[in-house]
Amino acid sequence: MSNFYRAALSLCFVLSIALAHGETLNGTPPDSTSSIVNKTASLYMVEEGKTSFGAGKVRDALIKFRQASVKDKYSWRAVYWISKCHYKLNNYGLALKYANLAMDLGKEKVTDEIYYTLGSTYHRLGNLDTAIINYQIAMDKLTKLRSFDLQIAHNIEQCKFAQEILKNGNSFERIRLSGDVNSGFDDYNVLLTNGGKTMYFTSRRSNTTGGGLNPDDQLFFEDIYKVEWNAATAEWEDITNQLGKMNSDGFESLHYISSDTLSGMITWNTTMMDVKKTTRVSDICGIKKNNKGTWNSPKAIKNKSINTSFYDGNATLTADGNTMYFMTDRKGERSGCDIYYVEKIGKKWGTAEPLPEHINTKKHETTPFVTPDGQYLFFSSEGHPGLGRFDVFVCKNLGGSWSEPVNMGAGINSVNDDMFFTYSAETKKAYVSGYEITGGKASIDIYEVDMSTYVFPK
């Protein structure tokens, strides 16, 4: 097929898109200097951007939609998709700005799904009344099937639940960690050792090992970092990711360290790397220190009920090292991500089993953390009643069964994703990872919460 013929087909395709939506290219707004060629090019760029967006390459898509908007500054489609990209990138203020601009440009032609975009954005920004109004308009205008796919009714329930919880104020105050911890990139997943004076955490900042970008989400790969508490300055300082062989050019996240700090469990993923030994997806790996006190290379647990061809990670263990809880998406088509547990039999792990259905819902449960005594399990879920997307919940080990999960409440939970909750009995402090919205943009940050007055559920 000749290049001319391909170009002709592409032109026919984008023209058919415009005509299908009742638009014409032979007329422009009175104050517009956009030519038919520019309008056609803009439509074509929007379709290219949608392809990248569907493949998860949101940043590539955003560039294409911006180019489309430059070609035709009256294109509501380009601006609408810019809004969707910013929402996907957690830039909620910018998502709202461009959604409103798309409404102004499109008038009655704009897609009805923009009301869902507005509802979601207002929800993330904490404007719950306006979020509910837009969610309801979206539900009224869209088909029942599309409303179900977008979980609009569930989102309205979350808004109403948040209103009920927030009217009594925050149960906790969470304080954003200063010093060398939060970077402006995504920082999360705290683990404390040395009596709370040494902190490990995960980050996707620019100086990760290898400095590579994940081709899927176009963010830097994960690395594990360590910082020390400086009592004189009251800051976390001396950050390093030079941790022996713990970090590679791929994804690494540390979730457990033994009380003697000589061994641990990490989630390891090297599928994107050009190396001889790669993981199948994300695997749970053991890691040990050598005689020199540095970390050796991770080794995947050889147990087919723990590591599968699906995502397996976020392992948390009791103090004796004999009970492990972890997350997996091995039954993702039926119930999203679930939390599994497995016990050690002698020196080997037994068969991993899912926690009961009153904990694992049909939606996602993730980032479990078990207290060292095994009495309490904290986890994040989007399936239990919450303020917005993922909330942190806690349940108590009743000896052979688990209590009903309890929402940790406002302060720990927000209208955005709240995950990677950990608790230190030594310091009576908890750490949770969530979003800090600054100037319309957001990244995941680590927050500290005073738990000294918290009464654990009976």
Image: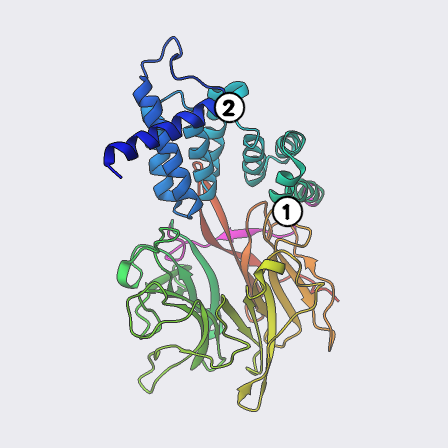
Q: Secondary structure at mark 2?
A: helix
Relative to 397, say whether 434 is above or below.
above
Q: Position of residue 342 (x, y in %)?
A: 60, 78
What residue lies at 35% left-to-right and 24% top-to-bottom?
40
Q: Three-letter amino acid code at disc 1?
A: Leu
Rendering quarter of residue 318: bottom right
Instruction: Answer left or right for 208 relative to 326.
Output: left
Instruction: Answer left or right for 59 relative to 119.
Output: left
Relative to 371, say whether 451 is above or below.
above
Q: Which mark is residue 387?
A: 1
Separation of marks 2 and 1 at Cα, in angstroms: 27 Å
Q: Nearer the viewer, residue 186 or 57?
A: 57
Segment tinted magenta in the rendering: 165-183
Q: Position of residue 311 (x, y in %)?
A: 49, 65
Rendering quarter of residue 456: bottom right
Q: Three-letter amino acid code at disc 2?
A: Met
Q: Which mark is residue 103?
A: 2
Please identify the residue farthest to the top as the structure is shown.
30
Residue 336 shows in this picture: no
Q: Position of residue 240 (x, y in %)?
A: 32, 65
Q: Secondary structure at mark 1?
A: loop
- Report if residue 278 lies within the magenta region: no
What residue lies at 70% left-to-right and 72% top-to-bottom?
397
Quadrant of the image for the C terminus? Answer: bottom right
- In front: mark 2 or mark 1? 2
